[in-house]
Image (cartoon, rainbow, N blue to C red):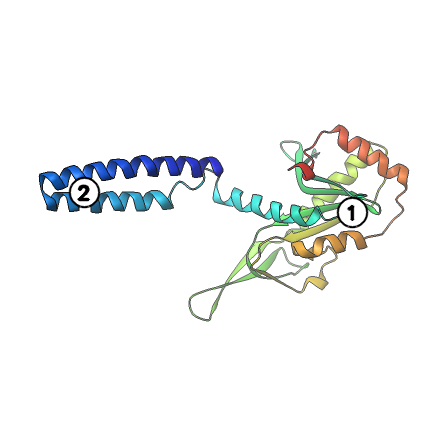
Amino acid sequence: MRQAARSRALRLGLGGAIAIALSAGGYLIMPPLGMMMAGISAMFLFFGTITGGSSVPSDVLTGIEGEVKCLRELQRLPEEFLLFNQVQMPDPWLPNGRRELDFFVIGPHGLTIVEVKNTSGMIYVDPDQRHWRVARRGCGSSPNWHSMDSPLRQVSAQVNAVERWLLAQGIHAPVHPMICFARSDVILQNTDSSSVPVLVPEQLVDRIQSESTGAWSATQRESVVRVQSGKTPRLASAA
C-alpha cells in the first residue's frame, strides 16, 4: 500500500506538471483552448487520485486488515502465551496437503486456534444451520438480508488437523477453537448457542485466558513449542 501511494503521488506530480504546461500553452494560443485543456487535465487528475490505491485484491486486503486488528489484541496476552500467525498445518484431506490457521496460540491451559472472519453486518449465529443469516443496512430503514457459510465446519476441520498433527508427534493436548469477527461494524447475535466461542477482537484475550480444560503439563507445552517452532512459521509478534 505504501508503494502504491508513492507511485500514485509520482504520477500525480508528473501529471500536474504536464497539465499546467498544456493549459498554459493552450491559453497562449487561444484562451478558450487553455480553459478546455485545464478542465480535461483536472478530470484526469481527479480520477488519478481515486484509482490505483493498491494492487492487492480488496478481499485479500480486508482479510489482512482483520488479522492485523486481531493481532493487536492478541499481543496483549501475557508472556507465558506464545503466538503464531498464518501457520501452515499438514492436512492430507486437502488437495494441497496444507491447512492455514490464522492464529495459533500456545498457552498455559492448552492450544487455541483463532479463525478470523471479516463479514460485516448483523450476524445471527446458528450452530444447527449450514448458513448463518446476515443483515446489512439497505436503502431507507429496511435491511438487506444475506447469508454466509457457517464457519463451524471449517473450524472443526482445523481442530482435527491440529489434533492429528499433535498425535503424529506423540503429543495429546487440548485444542480450543474460536471464531473472531474482526469488522468494527459487526453485530453478533445468539452467540451463546454455539459451543465454539464466537467473538469480536476485544473479547479474545479474556476468553483465551479463561480457557482451562484438560490436563496440560509443562512438558507437553514445551514439546508443542519445540515442534511448532521447528516448523519455522512466521511469529505473529514479528508480523
Question: Relative to residue 219, is residue 142 drawn left or right?
Answer: left
Say which of 129 and 165 sits in front: 165
Residue ID for mark 1: 78
Residue for point 47% across, 35% down: 3
Question: Eyeballing the image, is 210 above or below 21?
Answer: below
Type of the residue with mark 1: Pro
Confirm or deny contact between disc 2 and disc 1 (CB under 8 A): no
- Left or right of 165, for residue 37: left
| Spot occupied by residue 211 in the image (x, y as percentages of width and height) | 81, 53
Few, some or many C-alpha atoms within 10 Å of disc 2 (few <14, some 14-19, many ≥20)?
Answer: many
Residue 186 appears at what percent x and percent y? 58, 59
* Neighbours of disc 1 within 10 Å: few (<14), some (14-19), many (20+): few
State the count of labels: 2
Q: Residue at (76%, 31%) from the top-left corner?
A: 229
Q: Where, quadrant-wise, is the C terminus in this rendering?
A: top right
Left or right of 33 in this view: 73? right
Task: Identify the mark nearer the N-term, 2 or 1.
Answer: 2
**Residue 37 circle label:** 2
For image coordinates 75% across by 55% down, the residue present is 207
Q: Position of residue 130 (x, y in %)?
A: 62, 55
Residue 44's mark? none
- The amino acid on which the numbered mark 2 sits, given as a three-letter code, is Met
Q: Residue at 75% x, 48% y: name it.
A: 77
Residue 198 in sight here: yes
